[in-house]
Image: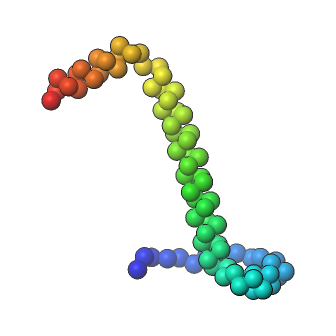
Amino acid sequence: MTDTVTVSAKIDVRLRKKLDELGIKPSEAIKRALEKEVEERMREKLRKEVEEASTIIAKVSKEDWVKAVRETRDER
């Protein structure tokens, strides 16, 4: 079993009634929403990191790449 923690959220009474009417379990909906939010933010973070890396990589000349590959091969 994985470790868990409890989080709480205050919601409007009308929303709670609608959840009950529709048979939606708040804990499951909250879990899904948080998982989706984390996934979206991780993707955005990764996208930014890739952009930063691309900027750095673009500054390296073709000759430097070739030299680095040859040096790596020679080390084997």
- Across and down, in percent, residue 5 comes to 53, 76
**Residue located farthest toward the top when viewing the structure as drawn:** 63
Residue at 51%, 37% (x, y): give it.
Answer: 50
Residue at 45%, 26% (x, y): give it.
Answer: 57
Residue at 51%, 39% (x, y): give it.
Answer: 49
Which quarter of the figure is the C terminus placed in?
Answer: top left
Up the image or down, 65 lies above or below 28; here it is above
Q: How many marks?
A: 0
Up the image or down, 20 lies above or below 52; here it is below
Residue at 43%, 76% (x, y): give it.
Answer: 2
- Residue 11 occupies quadrant: bottom right
**Residue located farthest toward the front when viewing the structure as drawn:** 22
Q: Is residue 30 left or right of residue 10?
A: left
Up the image or down, 13 lies above or below 76; here it is below
Q: Is residue 23 left or right of residue 6?
A: right
- Across and down, in percent, residue 62 comes to 39, 16
- Residue 13 occupies quadrant: bottom right
**Residue located farthest toward the left when viewing the structure as drawn:** 76
- Across and down, in percent, residue 40 comes to 60, 54
Which quarter of the figure is the N terminus placed in?
Answer: bottom left
Q: How is the image coloured?
A: rainbow
